[in-house]
Image (tube, grey):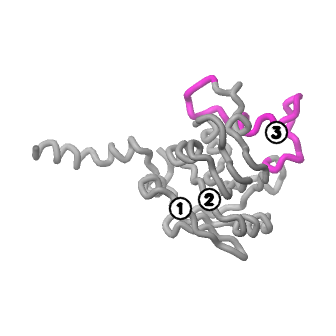
C-alpha cells in the first residue's frame, strides 16, 4: 500500500538518455530477492558509482541540487527491456514518485502504476520546455491530469483504474479488499 497521491510538487532531476532499460535502472546482479526493500544502492548502480563504489559526482542524481527531488525527467522510451518490478522499487526507494518522458515502455508503465510510481508521458515540445527549466518546481496533478512548471504545462493520460488506485494509495488487491463489504453483500443476495 502506498500513500494516496493526488498532487506531487517537487524539484526534478534530468537524466536525458534515451532507451534507458530496466537493467540500467536496476542491474540484474541485484535481483536476489522479491522484497520491495533494499534496492536504494541498486538504482543506476553502474552509472552512479565508480568501480571502487564511490559516488560519481557528475551523475545527475548525485549532484547536490538533486537532493530531495521526487521527479525524474528522462529521455524517450524509459524503462524498456525486461519486465522488472525491481527497477520501480529502486526508484521508489530513492524517493522518486514520478517519471516524466516523451515515451515510457509499456511493461515498465504497468509495473510503475502497480507500485505507486506515476509514469507521465508528455509531448516533445513540452518536454524540451521542462528540461530548459532545471531549477523549477514541477507539479504533477493526477486530479487534472496536468503537469506544470514555470513557463509551461502539458496534459498527460493515465488509465482510469490505475489513476484511481494511485489517488487512493491502493494496489489492485487493496482495492478489492476495500470492496469486501460490497462483495459480501452481493454474494449474500444471490
What's the CA distance linking mark 3 and mark 1? 30 Å
- Residue 43 location, quadrant: top right
Q: Which mark, residue 121?
A: 2
Image spot of residue 27 (x, y percent):
71, 31
Does 180 appear above or below 32?
below
**Mark closer to the chain start, 3 or 1:** 3
Image spot of residue 18 (x, y percent):
75, 49
- Residue 25 location, quadrant: top right
Secondary structure of the residue carrying numbered label 1? loop
Measuring 64% from the left and 26% from the top, which residue is drawn there? 31
Residue 83 inside the magenta-drawn segment:
no
Image spot of residue 124 (x, y percent):
71, 64
**Mark 1 = which residue?**
157
**Mark closer to the chain start, 2 or 1:** 2
Q: Residue furthest bottom?
A: 151
Secondary structure of the residue carrying numbered label 3? helix
The one nearer the camera, 86 or 101, is: 101
Measuring 10% from the left and 44% from the top, which residue is drawn there? 190
Does 190 appear above or below 149?
above
Magenta range is 32-61
**Mark closer to the chain start, 3 or 2:** 3
Left or right, residue 64 beside residue 175: right
What's the CA distance linking mark 3 and mark 2? 24 Å
- Mark 2 burial class by Cα count in 10 Å: few <14, some 14-19, many 20+: many
Image spot of residue 81 (x, y percent):
66, 37
Task: Tell which tag, 3 or 2, sits nearer the viewer.
Answer: 2
Does the residue at mark 2 contact the one at mark 1 (Cβ under 8 Å)?
A: yes
Does the residue at mark 3 contact the one at mark 1 (Cβ under 8 Å)?
A: no
The one nearer the camera, 113 or 18, is: 18
Helix, strand or loop: magenta stretch: loop
Measuring 22% from the left and 49% from the top, which residue is drawn there? 182
Amino acid at each position: 500500500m502506498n500513500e494516496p497521491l493526488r498532487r506531487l510538487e517537487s524539484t526534478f532531476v534530468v537524466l536525458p538518455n534515451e532507451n534507458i532499460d530496466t537493467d540500467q535502472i536496476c542491474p540484474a546482479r541485484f535481483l536476489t530477492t522479491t522484497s520491495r526493500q533494499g534496492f536504494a544502492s541498486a538504482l543506476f548502480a553502474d552509472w552512479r558509482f565508480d568501480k571502487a563504489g564511490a559516488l560519481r559526482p557528475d551523475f545527475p542524481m548525485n549532484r547536490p541540487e538533486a537532493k530531495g527531488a521526487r521527479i525524474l525527467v528522462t529521455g524517450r522510451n524509459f524503462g524498456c527491456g525486461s519486465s522488472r518490478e525491481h527497477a520501480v522499487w529502486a526508484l521508489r526507494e530513492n524517493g522518486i514518485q514520478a517519471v516524466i518522458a516523451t515515451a515510457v515502455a509499456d511493461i515498465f508503465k504497468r509495473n510503475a502504476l502497480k507500485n505507486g510510481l506515476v509514469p507521465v508521458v508528455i509531448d516533445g515540445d513540452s518536454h524540451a520546455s521542462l528540461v530548459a527549466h532545471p531549477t523549477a518546481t514541477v507539479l504533477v496533478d493526477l486530479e487534472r491530469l496536468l503537469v506544470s512548471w514555470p513557463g509551461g504545462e502539458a496534459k498527460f493520460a493515465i488509465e482510469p483504474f490505475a489513476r484511481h488506485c494511485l489517488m487512493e494509495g491502493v494496489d489492485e488487491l487493496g482495492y478489492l479488499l476495500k470492496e469486501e463489504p460490497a462483495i459480501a453483500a452481493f454474494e449474500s443476495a444471490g
